[in-house]
């Protein structure tokens, strides 16, 4: 039996996958995780606390650091497993485990390789995504697939809703795949990158709304970056304003034009957007009705801060 692991893990996917490995009796010799960022809303479970509960050594330094490579070679793990670890793992580290290094990715590969795949899938209006366990190679999210689980994306789902589904799918994949990996019976399916896509990271500034896009596209952006993510925003009378909840409707109006106050309807490139929850920067989030009752409304929503 090949059961000695080093795990790189963070976030809910990391917590749940490590928990499943422990439930199955895997020997985790060391965990690498991250310090929580003071600029990020921490809404997820702590891998470091999980490691502490189980008496597993846990480091927040980069797995690729020279001193950590020395430690990894001393441990001589059978596998390195990565679950939502945010650092690229170097080829030198990938070569250390005797039986390979694998990553759990939050999409149905080869689609949405790269960063924040759940958010991108929602923003792009996808109907499905998933979780995929694959071998790591130097090129990101490109190694042979071991197992994957598909999940549906409902039109009302936010990125957080989908992330919860993907987390459950990740746990299912690990529950199925670990015994097969341990016993040397796991599949290795070559990934056809030509059938997929690659997505880059997102910054808070990428949440800026372009009102010339269709109401459905703007709606998908809003639900793709709403709480607990940084949010979609526009400028209302020169003030940065976050739109946290909305709904697309049929209709015609100039992009950015307010055509109704009750409900609060904004024109888009194709259709109208009903604003349901919003927040002027520096103020509290509120419903559209409360916002209308406490603010003097300008004629249009401006795209520039002027």
Image (cartoon, helix red, strand yellow):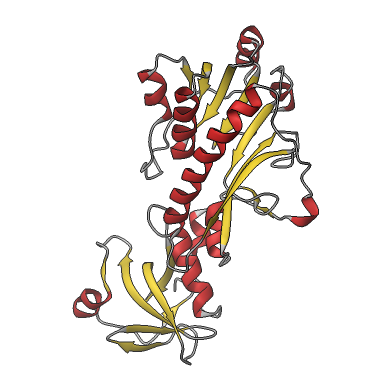
> x, y percentage for residue 48?
41, 25
Residue furthest to the top in view is 74
Of 108 and 2, nearer the camera is 2
Q: Is residue 211 left or right of residue 80?
A: left
Residue drawn at x 49%, y 19% as measured from the top left:
25
For residue 37, what is the image quadrant?
top left
In which quarter of the view is residue 298 placed?
bottom left
Q: Residue at x 58, y 65 (%)?
A: 124
Q: Is residue 108 above or below residue 173?
A: below
Residue 293 position (above or below residue 84):
below
Say whether residue 111 is visible: yes
Q: Name the spot of residue 131 as percent of width and height, x first.
A: 58, 46
From the viewer's side, name the closer residue of 154 and 49: 154
* Image quarter (top left, top right, bottom left or bottom right) of the N terminus: top right
Q: Residue furthest bottom?
A: 252
Q: In the rendered view, tell whether residue 206 sits above or below residue 214.
A: above
Residue 210 appears in view: no
- Quarter placement of the C terminus: bottom left
Quarter of image, res 273: bottom left
Q: For the point 54% across and 37% down, which residue is it?
A: 84
Q: Position of residue 38 (x, y in %)?
A: 38, 38
């Amino acid at each position: 039996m090949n059961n000695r692991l080093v795990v790189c893990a963070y976030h809910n996917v990391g917590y749940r996958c490590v928990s499943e490995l422990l439930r199955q009796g895997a020997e985790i010799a060391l965990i690498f995780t991250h310090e929580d960022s003071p600029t990020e809303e921490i809404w997820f479970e702590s891998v470091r606390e999980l490691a502490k509960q189980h008496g597993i050594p846990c480091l927040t330094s980069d797995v690729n650091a020279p001193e950590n490579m020395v430690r990894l070679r001393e441990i001589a793990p059978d596998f390195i497993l990565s679950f939502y670890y945010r650092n690229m793992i170097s080829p030198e580290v990938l070569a250390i485990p005797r039986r390979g290094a694998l990553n759990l990715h939050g999409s149905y590969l080869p689609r949405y390789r790269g960063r924040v795949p759940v958010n991108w899938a929602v923003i792009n209006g996808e109907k499905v995504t998933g979780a995929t366990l694959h071998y790591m190679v130097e090129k990101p999210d490109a190694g042979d697939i071991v197992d994957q689980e598909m999940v549906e994306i409902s039109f009302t789902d936010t990125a957080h809703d989908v992330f919860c589904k993907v987390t459950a799918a990740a746990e299912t994949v690990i529950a199925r795949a670990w015994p097969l990996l341990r016993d040397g019976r796991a599949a290795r399916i070559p990934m056809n990158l030509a059938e997929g896509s690659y997505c880059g990271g997102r910054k808070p500034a990428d949440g800026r709304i372009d009102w010339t896009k269709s109401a459905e596209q703007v709606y998908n952006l809003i639900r793709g970056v709403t709480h607990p993510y940084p949010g979609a925003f526009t400028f209302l009378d020169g003030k940065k304003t976050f739109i946290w909840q909305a709904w697309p409707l049929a209709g015609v109006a100039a992009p950015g034009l307010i055509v109704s106050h009750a409900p609060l309807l904004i024109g888009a490139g194709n259709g109208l957007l009903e604003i349901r929850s919003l927040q002027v920067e520096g103020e509290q989030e509120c419903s559209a009705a409360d916002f209308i009752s406490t603010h003097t409304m300008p004629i249009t929503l401006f795209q520039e801060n002027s």
